[in-house]
């Protein structure tokens, strides 16, 4: 029970309040129209985003192809080593090992034209990849 105090020695019981602010049907229609307009703005923004840039089709085979340039090959090997690490840690089977082996069979066309530091870096990444392949093959035996 709620008690209302208005002054000294004067207390009275309070009445239950009645809910008077019920949403009207016009409020619901106004809200739904705002939602629809927001959705249409999002749709227009998405269309503008895609129409402004060239759309690319995902081709898994192209992603797995070893690039011929030194920078691309270096990035490819590092990506495959990182994928191999994630697969090992998560316990998933991996195809990264086969892609690393395939990359190690090729050589970059422009490696000799690269600065000595880039060539050394490429040699280090290739050595790390060879070590990982050897470790995985030894673990299979």
Image (cartoon, rainbow, N blue to C red):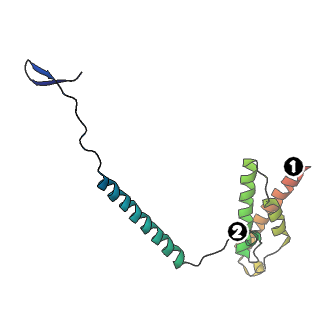
Q: Looking at this rendering, what residue extends furthest in the top direction?
A: 9
Q: Which residue is mark 2?
A: 75
Say which residue appears at 78% left-offset and 60% top-offset: 96
Whichever of labels 2 and 1 marks the residue nearer the N terminus, that label is 2
Disc 2 crowd rating (10 Å Cα; few below 14, some 14-19, many 20+) is: some
Query: Please, is residue 18 above or below residue 74 in the view?
Result: above
* Front residue (pair 57, 85): 57
Residue 40 place in picture, x, y as percent: 43, 67
User: Is 98 displayed left or right of 24 in the figure?
Assistant: right
Left-right relation of 12 to 75: left
The answer to the question of whether label 2 and label 1 lie on touching residues, with beta carbons closer than 8 A, is no
Residue at image point 74% right, 60% down: 81
Task: Residue 121: tell me if it is visible.
Answer: no
The image quadrant of residue 8 is top left
Residue name at image x 81 percent, y 59 percent: 97
Which quadrant does the N terminus fall into? Answer: top left
Please tell me whether mark 2 sits on a helix, a strand or a loop: helix
Residue 106 at x, y = what percent? 83, 73
At which x and y percent is residue 19?
Answer: 25, 38
Q: Which mark is residue 57?
A: none
Query: Pointer 1: what residue?
Result: 139
Image position, residue 66 (x, y; %):
77, 72
Answer whether residue 30 is visible to the viewer in this image: yes
Task: In this rendered view, identify the residue nearer to me: 26 or 48.
Answer: 26
Report helix, strand or loop for mark 1: helix
How crowded pointer 1 is (Cα within 10 Å; few <14, some 14-19, many 20+) is rated as few
Residue toward you, 52 or 73: 52
Q: Residue furthest right?
A: 141
């Amino acid at each position: 029970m709620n008690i209302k105090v208005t002054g000294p020695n004067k207390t009275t019981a309070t009445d239950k309040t009645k809910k008077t602010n019920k949403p009207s049907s016009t409020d619901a229609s106004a809200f739904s129209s705002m939602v629809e307009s927001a959705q249409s703005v999002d749709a227009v923004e998405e269309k503008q985003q895609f129409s402004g840039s060239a759309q690319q089709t995902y081709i898994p085979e192209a992603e797995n192809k070893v690039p011929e340039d030194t920078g691309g090959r270096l990035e490819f090997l590092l990506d495959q080593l990182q994928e191999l690490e994630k697969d090992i840690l998560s316990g998933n089977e991996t195809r990264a090992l086969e892609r690393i082996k395939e990359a190690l069979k090729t050589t970059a066309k422009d490696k000799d034209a690269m600065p000595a530091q880039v060539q050394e870096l490429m040699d280090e990444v290739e050595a790390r990849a060879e070590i990982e392949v050897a470790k995985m093959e030894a673990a299979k035996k």
